[in-house]
Image: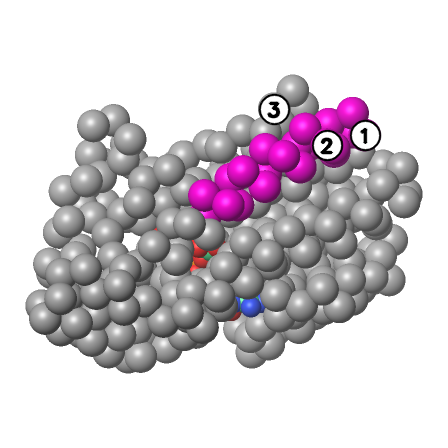
């Protein structure tokens, strides 16, 4: 049976875990060759092996998405391995400046510290925000998205080929959520970057759309899910009463990189279990 991405090449930043990995596996199952780019090589190689075991083609390249040079090397690696780039998902991201995917204990510690700071000063998340931490979140989530977009779109433009780029924003692109402003501000930036890039690239045959997930079962929400106070707040605000799965986000990304969305660009789609119905 023909796959929806047969003959296509996809680059996935943040592809070692969670939403990025689900996109890599989903796209591969639909026939795409996949380059996984991530800060963490170990789960990245595991993702590549899983795809190869299922009969797909995948490669891994190490990437700090905040580095321009590393993004350019990633785009060059895609061309070297697979000849081109047709589809991109920019899923590399952090929830705070010290975030390391999979280190749940460290996340739980930070949640506890933030709780203590807020008990002493209800405005601590804003007034005591560490500037280096703010900068790292913006460097990875916003500047990183820009750099990945630049490097991959440049390949499409050089090769005079159409393409589709999907950025991963969040419900936090339009809802300030609670606590530190860094993450929502970075995601609001991703959303505006997406719209701006969509307008610039539309006449050149490249579509750019954003996905704004609600709370999804990945390393990023694993610690939060263990703290009743926060988890209940998330579930109370999600009419479907659960977190989404990474595959539920990958299915939206698949639609956006496939020809089925050929007239869709500059959009933000929220797979969020009904978050914005209130
Ligand atoms: N999980 C959610 O509820 C949720 C909701 C909305 C948006 N998002 C966004 O989805 C994206 C994927 O997150 P996830 O939930 O799958 O979390 P995750 O931790 O499972 O995956 C994030 C991946 O990004 C990688 N990464 C982090 N910093 C990087 C860097 N500097 N360079 C390259 N790679 C880097 C991590 O190593 C990891 O593999 C993020 O942008 C996140 O903000 C997640």
Q: Earlier in the sequence, mark 3 or mark 2?
A: 2
Q: Which residue is found at the position 59% from the left and 33% from the top?
A: 195
Q: Secondary structure at mark 2?
A: helix
Q: Which residues are magenta?
A: 187-207
**Residue 102 appears in view:** no
Q: Secondary structure at mark 1?
A: helix
Quadrant holding the N terminus: top right
Residue 53 position within the rendered picture, expressed as x and y whole percent measured from the top left:
62, 64
Q: Which residue lies under the disc numbered 2?
A: 200
Q: Could you give the CA–CA distance between mark 3 and mark 2, rounded to whole angstroms?
A: 14 Å
Name the one closer to the observer, 177 or 84. 177
Residue 156 position within the rendered picture, expressed as x and y whole percent measured from the top left:
82, 43
Quadrant holding the C terminus: top left
Q: Which residue is found at the position 18% from the left and 46% from the top?
A: 235
Residue 66 position within the rendered picture, expressed as x and y whole percent measured from the top left:
61, 65
State if disc 2 and disc 1 touch (CB < 8 Å): yes
Q: Which residue lies under the disc numbered 1?
A: 204
Furthest residue to the front? 127
User: Dot 2, crowdedness within 10 Å: few (<14), some or many (≥20)?
Assistant: some
Q: Which residue lies under the disc numbered 3?
A: 264
* Residue 14 drawn above or below residue 39: above
């Amino acid at each position: 049976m023909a796959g929806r991405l047969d003959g296509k090449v996809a680059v996935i930043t943040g592809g070692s875990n969670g939403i990025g990995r689900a996109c890599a596996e989903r796209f591969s199952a639909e026939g795409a060759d996949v380059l996984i780019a991530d800060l963490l090589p170990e789960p990245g190689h595991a993702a590549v092996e899983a795809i190869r075991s299922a009969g797909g083609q995948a490669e891994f390249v190490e990437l700090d998405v905040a580095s321009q040079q590393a993004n350019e090397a990633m785009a060059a690696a895609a061309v070297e391995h697979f000849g081109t780039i047709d589809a991109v998902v920019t899923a590399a991201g952090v929830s705070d400046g010290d975030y390391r995917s999979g280190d749940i204990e460290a996340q739980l510690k930070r949640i506890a510290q933030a709780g203590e700071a807020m008990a002493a000063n209800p405005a601590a998340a804003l007034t005591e925000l560490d500037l280096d931490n703010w900068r790292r979140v913006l460097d990875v989530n916003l500047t990183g998205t820009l750099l990945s977009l630049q490097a991959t779109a440049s390949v499409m433009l050089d090769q005079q080929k159409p393409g589709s780029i999907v950025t991963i924003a969040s419900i936090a692109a339009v809802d300030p959520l609670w606590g530190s402003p860094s993450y929502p501000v970075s995601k609001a930036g991703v959303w505006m970057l997406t719209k701006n890039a969509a307008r610039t690239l539309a006449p050149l045959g490249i579509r750019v759309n954003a996905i704004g997930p609600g709370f999804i079962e990945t390393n990023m929400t694993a610690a939060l899910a263990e703290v009743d106070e926060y988890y209940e707040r998330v579930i109370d605000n999600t009419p479907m009463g659960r977190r989404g799965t990474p595959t539920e986000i990958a299915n939206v990304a698949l639609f956006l990189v496939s020809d089925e969305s050929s007239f869709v660009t500059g959009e933000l789609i929220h797979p969020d279990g009904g978050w914005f119905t209130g």
